[in-house]
Image: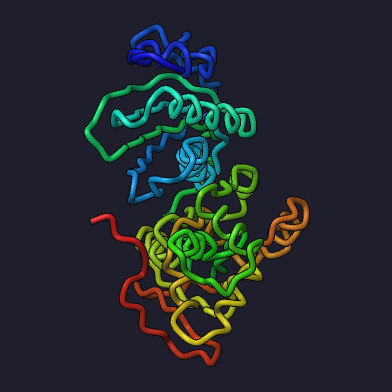
Amino acid sequence: MSGEGLSEFGRIKHFFAPLAGPGGLGLRDDAALIDCASGRRLVVTVDAMVEGVHYLPADPPDLVARKLLRVNLSDLAAMGATPRHYLLMTALPPAHDDRWVARFAEGLAEDQQRFGVDLLGGDSVATAGPTVLSLTAIGEVEAGGEIRRSGALPGDRIWVSGTIGDAFLGLGVLRGDYPELRPDERAALTARFQLPEPRTVLGPRLAGIARAMCDISDGLLADLGHICQASQAGAEISLAALPLSPPARRLTSAAGDVPVRLATGGDDYELLFAAPPAANEAIAKLATELALPITAIGTIESGERVRLLDASGNELQVEVAGYRHF
């Protein structure tokens, strides 16, 4: 594209209106319309990403868009909701021209098709920088079927989907760390940071199985702490039980604090949940059906503390449990 570029409304019409669903009304009105069937509830979440904080300035715009959408879909999955719609706010500096916006919209279009969601509207403003992006995702769940953080009970087992720590390592790879890894391992870890996999199929399937659940964004220990605080309980997890990818296992075999840092690094966007022991068989069946590892890593217990234990059962001292926003 050449010339002075499109205006705000030109960008909306050209790049974003094609992403709108019926409720978005072509992005021509002041607000959107949402239908909700009887006996269902809407689940709404909002998350923001800041350039240089949540993604690197050199990250491709289509991957930035997809990550922005996916981290919000992960929040819906953590409530057991099926994603339906989203709203978008962008604050872009002048350097992000129409070509950047076009690639950004292409990323959204790709993931809209994959996850079955559509755009309802939003807002766009200019800024001197850095780029700020905010997305509000809307999902749907059977009334009373939502999974909250507050239902864990002592004796429940603690489970986590997928693998832990890959996004933390992927960010390190992008910053030049871990040169000992093979190119394919570096690429796999980088992808986990730039393009998380929200568990939108698993989340709703855990309704009636999980007593409490959240996704892992700030770090496994920090987010488990959120469940425990809401449930007024404590927890004990085993560092050795954490599910790790092959490159993560290679790195943890070396000396240092890498294993603990994987439990606190954040950006995993896996589901962390508590379920009674009677649910073990159902969880194993679900893992097989979805071809997704779901690993038991500890137990909910009485008290208020989250304890991380080493292979010998000794408690490890962790100074920072996860990412702190302030």
Please determine whether, in this image, residue 32 is positioned above or below residue 91. above
Give the total number of marks visible in the rendering: 0
Q: Position of residue 126 (x, y in %)?
A: 26, 26
Taking 102 as reference, is 245 left or right? right
Q: Is residue 246 left or right of residue 16?
A: right
- Residue drawn at x 35%, y 28% is 89
Find residue 231 and report its horizontal and vertical position in percent: 40, 60
Quadrant in which residue 57 is drawn: top left
Q: Is 247 located above or below residue 56 in the figure?
A: below
Identify the residue shown where x is 58% and y is 29%: 112
Quadrant (top left/top right/bottom left/bottom right) for the C terminus: bottom left
Residue 98: percent from left, percent from top: 42, 22
In the displayed structure image, the side of residue 111 where residue 237 appears, left or right:
left
Return the residue nearer the eye: 236 or 67: 67
Q: Residue at x 64, y 43 (%)?
A: 201
Between residue 308 and residue 117, name the one nearer to us: 117
